[in-house]
Amino acid sequence: MTPARIMIVEDEQITATDIEDILTQLGHDVTAVATSGSVAVSKADEDRPDLVLMDIHLKGEMDGAEAALEIRRRFGVPSIFLTAHADDETLERAKLAEPLGYIVKPFHETELQAAIQMAMHRRTLDSERVDLAEELASTLDALEDGVIRCDQLGRVTYLNAEAEKWTGWRLAESRMRPLSEIFRLLSGKNGAPMEIFLRDAVHGRRVIQFPQGCRVRSRDGVERDAAIHCAPVRDGSGASGGAVLVFGNPDRRVPAQEAAPGRPHNSESPVDQEMVIASQSMRDLMGFSARIASSRVGAILVLGESGVGKDVLARYLHSHSRRGDAPFLAVNCAAIPETLLESELFGYEKGAFTDARAQKKGVFDLAHGGTVFLDEIGELQPHIQAKLLRVLEDQTFRRLGGVRDVSVDLRIITATNRNLAQAVEDKSFREDLYYRLNVITISIPPIRERKEDILPLVEFFIRLYNKRFEREVQGVTEETRKLLLAHDWPGNVREIRNAIERAMVLEESDHLQPESLSLESRVSAAAAVAVAPGAASLEEVERSMLVQALEKADGNQTRAAEMLGISRDTLRYRIKKYNLR
């Protein structure tokens, strides 16, 4: 492991000394030990460490979250937060500092070592991305064509040097402004604005060559003829990530068909995010989902614990529907502040509030004809719930500050890990909205109830990170396999992914060892059920765990189910399956 220069920020002297001793034993250089946020900022300026271990709760005017944000903003130094407990408000503020990890006190030396290794690996990757971005920017600046990149909401994220000349806007001041404000497109025939054509191109799903005779008007009113192409940009899952515009002098531009002979011009193949399933329960679920996807049902509710893959299923439902070529826009209702969520979903009219200098279309507008995925639907505030109900019932809504209804054609997929029925009883969720959402419900079972999916998922993530980390890991050892099957995976697929990613960084051999996973077996209420020695198959492992749980619970099925982390009905099914009566 490459030594790192690390600053410790901890106001408990004993804890700080323990951490310093551990870091020294691991070969790291401790640049300073600070006991307050203000001192930490000053020391970071002097020493410029590679990493900061930051206690999230510090005494004084500047706590750990504020100090980490200031150090990140001013010096580009990332932090790992140390905490014994933290309230939701503190955690939300901590996220602003983009920490590379959280370590819960008390922690083991191996946990600290793994967290530092992961953090330094991520910092290296971030540095490489920055270098690559700078190299790409310099390359694009050398082009004679203008290049503008925008996100899926039509907001500008990048201009190259030539685009700055054409538009009269600098990159820094154009970021996150509407594309139609920066790139003013006019018809060459009558000078009419072509905002609708521009919008359709940006939200389309194929390469578009704009009509001949288009003109671009700069910020100071200068108009120039332009040849323009627009192409969609996709993220790693195949979902829309916005678009890129390329434009220049029409006299020297070569049509796309001639520039790339044999390449389809207006073609596109939607890419599904891979679904890794082996269990019969998930096969049945996906069969049902395929039927629902191809139907004309307008509202689907996806239930499941955190990390089971509700977003992956939502993308599957979209891509396998008649709307598959239309936009798919996802919104995490819990991740956006309440004051911004309403305008993000419904948009606003010019003058709706102080900073509303122009009309802004919301997610429901932009996804017209396609699918909107609302994750964490249980976190919606009551007044937004009422507006969502109207969209579901009538497919209409009003923008903030608007006086006219906007009609849309949408499929709305919602997801939550909350008990919405209980939320209705608690009066925190509208009863009428609940019944409207609950027309078609798909419940994704947790990993602990479909252990047949664990090893295929592990193999999938090993292949993924072999490619990403340029490794050649062949698989897992037999001991690791048993540990993977014995673990209850409260974080579900997300936890499996994180565990394999961590192991791929730490493991030096060609097979993942148990110690690389850093798992604490939580199959029972901390340890009561172990894997039987010599168990060779999933069935043997599962049967052994059932027998042990029933013995330890003196035959009480409710207690045995709690030990195994499964429902009583699931336990009874497996007792019958293995003839354990």
Image (cartoon, rainbow, N blue to C red):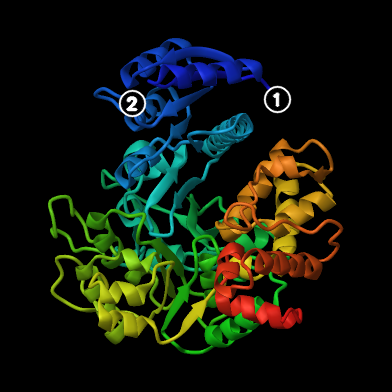
The percent position of residue 92, horizontal first and vertical second, equals 34, 44
The residue shown at (70%, 61%) is 457
- Per the rendering, the mark at residue 232 is none
The percent position of residue 179, horizontal first and vertical second, equals 36, 54
Height in image: 185 above or below 327? Answer: above
Question: Three-letter amino acid code at disc 1?
Answer: Met
* Drawn side of residue 241 relative to residue 469, left or right: left
The residue shown at (39%, 79%) is 410
Question: Three-letter amino acid code at disc 2?
Answer: Leu
The percent position of residue 317, horizontal first and vertical second, equals 54, 77
Q: On the rendered image, what quadrant is the N terminus found in?
A: top right
Residue 190 visible at all = yes
Q: Mark 2 points at which residue?
A: 58
Label located before the other in sequence (2 or 1): 1
Q: Mark 1 points at which residue?
A: 1
The answer to which of 489 and 344 lies nearer the viewer is 489
Residue 285 appears in which quarter of the rendering? bottom right
The residue shown at (40%, 87%) is 439
The answer to which of 70 and 192 lies nearer the viewer is 70
The residue shown at (38%, 75%) is 368
| Cα distance in 3D space between marks 2 and 1 | 30 Å
Height in image: 23 above or below 278? Answer: above
Residue 541 appears in which quarter of the rendering? bottom right
Callout 2: 10 Å neighbours few (<14), some, many (20+)? many
The answer to which of 344 and 84 lies nearer the viewer is 84
Describe the element under mark 2 as helix, strand or loop.
Answer: loop
Residue 27 visible at all = no
* Drawn side of residue 547 relative to residue 192, left or right: right
Residue 412 appears in which quarter of the rendering? bottom left
Height in image: 414 above or below 217? Answer: below
